[in-house]
Amino acid sequence: MQTDHDIIQQILQGDVEGYRELIQRYQHMIYVFIYKMVNNQADAEDLTQEVFVKAYEKLSSYRGDSQFSTWLHTLARNRTIDFIRRRKFHETDEQLAYVPSQVREESPQESLLGKERRQEIAQAFEQLSESYREVIVLRCTHEYPFEKIASLLGVAESTARVRYLRARQEFAKILSRMEGGLVHELPRV
């Protein structure tokens, strides 16, 4: 299996087909990150495609100081944040989802209660700042270690840990203020 560096060198020398391999390696990771941030399948698919087009256009600027996946994630992060900021100006009713649906049989009452809880959590998650949402997605959805999160965010590892703890605290405050006082436990540090 070729390394990312080898494939990138081939692409830069004119082997455009090699880029397909990079897309296959990283498309799912980028899509999941973007989807968790925007909570819309069509938007996530469009943004993922835009990220890979931009990455191809800027491939010659990739210096190799970090892993290709980190560089690609940074492009995805920046594009997603731009999208979210623009979307805020247009205020849609879409909500950011955090909690994956459970796969088990539920009674209609349980289903309704679960849906209400997920909506509360999604509403609370939407109220978090972009930086807090991002660190929660990276830690809880992707299960990245703090070292990797710090690298992706361009901050010290201690800063990433503190940001995650503050995000959890803020998330808990928002949930406790909401009707019913639902408190959702995020994974511990």
Image: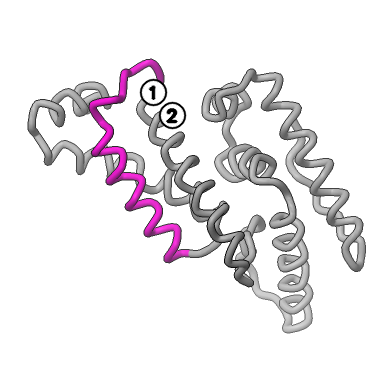
Q: Is residue 188 magenta?
A: no
Farthest residue, direction bottom = 108
Residue 185 picture location, percent across and down: 80, 47
Quarter of the figure that contains the C terminus: top right
Residue in view at x 50 percent, y 53 percent = 83
Farthest residue, direction front = 89
Residue 80 picture location, percent across and down: 49, 48
Q: Number of labelled discs?
A: 2
Instruction: Tell which of 177 and 2 is nearer to you.
Output: 177
Q: Which residues are magenta?
A: 41-66
Where residue 17 sits, quadrant-wise, is: top left
Q: What residue would you read off at disc 2?
A: 70
Judge left or right: residue 14 versus residue 81. Answer: left
Judge left or right: residue 182 versus residue 33. Answer: right
Judge left or right: residue 30 versus residue 145. Answer: left
Q: Amino acid at mark 2?
A: Thr
Residue in view at x 63 percent, y 72 percent = 93
Where residue 11 sits, quadrant-wise, is: top left
Instruction: Tell which of 65 and 6 is nearer to you.
Output: 65
Q: Residues within 10 Å of mark 1 (few under 14, many from 20)?
A: some
Q: Is residue 52 magenta?
A: yes
Is the C-beta separation of discs 1 and 2 under 8 Å? Answer: yes
Q: In the rendered view, would you say 143 is above or below 84?
A: above
Q: Which mark is residue 37?
A: none
Q: What residue would you read off at disc 1?
A: 67
Residue 64 picture location, percent across and down: 33, 18
Secondary structure predominantly adopted by residues drawn in magenta:
helix
Label 2: element kind: helix
